[in-house]
Amino acid sequence: MDQIFYDKLVKIVAPEYVFTQEPMKNHTTFRIGGPADWFVTPETKDQVRDLMALAKEEGMPVYVIGNGSNLLVGDGGIRGLVIQIGRIFSEIVIEDDVLTAKAGDSLAKIAQKAYDAGLTGLEFAAGIPGTLGGAVTMNAGAYGGEMKDVLTYVEVLSPDGEIRELKAEELNLSYRYSLIPEKEWIVLGAKMKLKKGDKTDIKAKMDEYSLARRTKQPLEFPSAGSTFKRPTGYFAGKLVQDSGLKGAYVGGAMVSEKHSGFLINYTGEATAKEMQSLIVQVQKKVYEDSGELKIELHPEVKMIGEFYPLEPMEPMVMKTEDKE
């Protein structure tokens, strides 16, 4: 352990929030990932700013994550500093029909608070397993709703250390996209404009979406949600299923038999290499099967850290083949 760097970290955050050689599989919903050199969980935006300044000063790579619900971390882990803006970086305030939350608040908690206040507009977010910061960054959505429908302002930390409040229109939000990664902004919080609604109706819609998730999604297995972005005019899950890939696997990584748009860690012991290999082979099969349409699937999951070479690649086993 670099004692000098450790001493600098604990001047910014409490020692109980500083970890070295921290297994990233403990911080991703895939339950996959090697160790991070350094892992810290700040409580305030000033701490985030100071941590970023320290990393810049030290010339150290830095990665900012939420609860890891959309990440595949390499088996080799992460060289540098991981800053997790999670549950201790949280606060939800509701004034009339405006809900303000910090980046570490979970979408499920935010949606519940909105319901408690009789506000509608966030029902779609109730079952999304992510934080507000990640949801804003990728314009997360489900069941016809997405973050851009409710966002009004977003507070970010810029690369020069300035904390700024941006209008939602300045983020250029579209399907699973925002300018935030390109600008290297870090989301610290956001304001959402909701509407007064009937709590019975809000609860009914949340229950409907919750039931749909439980019955149609493989929630019993570690996953990162929908693995691929939706190609224009198509549904990724149906394309994968039509290619006969439901249940196909590479080692402990499998195409879900419940929903083909989800790739899952079905043994609980899948490696990043196995998951990456499965992703690549699914992409190739769907592209080949699409013929002249040449449909390409692009991962929605973000890959970070050190990945081992894919070659030689373990072949994908189809469900109809027996695993020996």
Image (cartoon, rainbow, N blue to C red):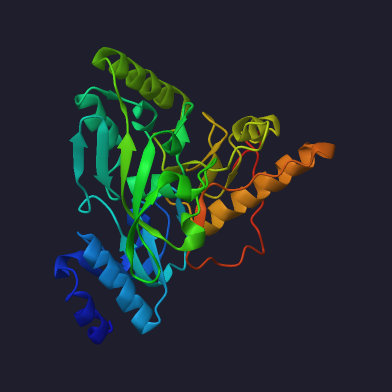
- Give above or below for 196 relative to 142: above
> What x and y, as percent, mark residue 87?
23, 50
Q: Quadrant of the N terminus?
A: bottom left
At 61% from the left and 39% from the top, the residue drawn is 248
At 20% from the left and 26% from the top, the residue drawn is 117
- Give above or below for 76 relative to 202: below
Tell me which corner region of the image, top left, top right, bottom left or bottom right, holds residue 157. Answer: bottom left
- Give above or below for 211 relative to 35: above
**Closer to the camera, 211 or 219?**
211
> What x and y, as percent, mark residue 323?
59, 42
Tell me which corner region of the image, top left, top right, bottom left or bottom right, holds residue 65. Answer: bottom left
At 64% from the left and 29% from the top, the residue drawn is 238
Q: Is residue 109 visible?
A: no
Q: How many marks?
A: 0
**Closer to the camera, 208 or 28?**
208
- Give above or below for 122 relative to 102: above
At 32% from the left and 29% from the top, the residue drawn is 194
Tell me which corner region of the image, top left, top right, bottom left or bottom right, holds residue 208. Answer: top left
43 horizontally vs 53: left or right: left
Q: Is residue 13 visible?
A: yes
6 horizontally vs 64: left or right: left
**Closer to the camera, 245 or 118?**
118
- Which residue is most to the bottom? 4
Q: Quadrant of the C terminus?
A: top right
> What x and y, as percent, mark residue 241?
64, 31
27 horizontally vs 293: left or right: left
> What x and y, as percent, mark residue 222?
41, 43
